[in-house]
Image (cartoon, rainbow, N blue to C red):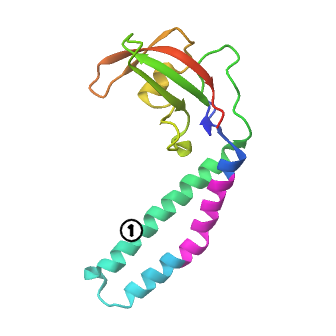
């Protein structure tokens, strides 16, 4: 899954199905389960001192936030392969290898994509992250800069950029 500047999220069919299944669970069985927890806690008496009630309500809030996130994500989703960069520039959906501060031995390889697609397979950086935004649009062999959390600038060299094969 990748994001483009048009706010479209490209999903593989597998990723789309997984997120859709999660949404269906959260809006169906999970809502029923949390409603039952709240009802059971409410029957215990005074709600001001009822930790189970407050915990269930907090869980319900987190669950509803995830429902809104998934709904928005799936509404803006396009299923298929993300467009590849025709000019060879770094774009969402690419695996990028960079070298820090010109040191060809200190490298990092990551997938430039939405955090929703993060996996244990490969480190994922969002195109909106400082590093992701810094390398976006640069070509192999070029230097790119991004801002560190302390406000200083860091330089990296783009060593490789190729479409993610999943």
Q: Is residue 51 left or right of residue 94?
A: left
| 159 drawn magenta | no
Residue at (37%, 12%) from the top-left corner?
Answer: 103
Farthest front residue?
105
Residue 93 percent location from the top left of the image:
61, 31
Q: Magenta region's main secondary structure? A: helix
On screen, 47 above or below 55? below
Residue at (46%, 20%) from the top-left corner?
Answer: 134
Magenta residues, start to end = 17-32
Q: How many marks?
A: 1
| 21 drawn magenta | yes
Residue at (56%, 43%) from the top-left corner?
Answer: 117
Q: Dot 1, crowdedness within 10 Å: few (<14), some or many (≥20)?
A: few
On screen, 116 above or below 54? above
In terms of depth relative to the viewer, which is nearer, 162 or 70? Answer: 162
Which quadrant holds the C terminus? top right
Farthest right residue?
80
Residue 100 percent location from the top left of the image:
38, 17
Which quarter of the picture shows residue 111?
Answer: top right
On screen, 52 above or below 152? below
Which residue is denoted by mark 1 in the rendering?
58
Residue 25 percent location from the top left of the image:
60, 67
Residue at disc 1, secondary structure: helix
Q: Is residue 110 left or right of residue 19?
A: left
Residue 8 percent location from the top left of the image:
65, 37
Which quadrant holds the N terminus? top right
Which quarter of the picture shows residue 148?
Answer: top left
Which quarter of the picture shows residue 156?
Answer: top left
């Amino acid at each position: 899954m990748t994001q483009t500047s048009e706010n479209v999220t490209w999903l593989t069919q597998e990723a789309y199905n997984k997120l859709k299944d999660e949404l269906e669970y959260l809006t169906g069985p999970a809502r029923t389960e949390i409603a039952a927890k709240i009802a059971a806690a409410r029957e215990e008496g005074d709600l001001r001192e009822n930790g189970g009630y407050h915990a269930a309500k907090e869980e319900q809030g987190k669950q509803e936030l995830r429902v809104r996130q998934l709904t928005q994500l799936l509404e803006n989703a396009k299923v298929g392969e993300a467009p590849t960069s025709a000019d060879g520039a770094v774009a969402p959906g690419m695996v990028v290898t960079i070298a820090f501060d010109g040191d060809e031995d200190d490298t990092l390889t990551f997938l430039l994509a939405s955090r929703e697609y993060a996996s244990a397979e490969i480190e994922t950086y969002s195109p909106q992250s400082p590093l992701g935004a810094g390398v976006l649009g640069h070509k192999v062999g070029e230097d790119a800069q991004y801002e560190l959390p302390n406000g200083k600038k860091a330089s990296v060299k783009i060593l490789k950029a190729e479409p993610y094969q999943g």
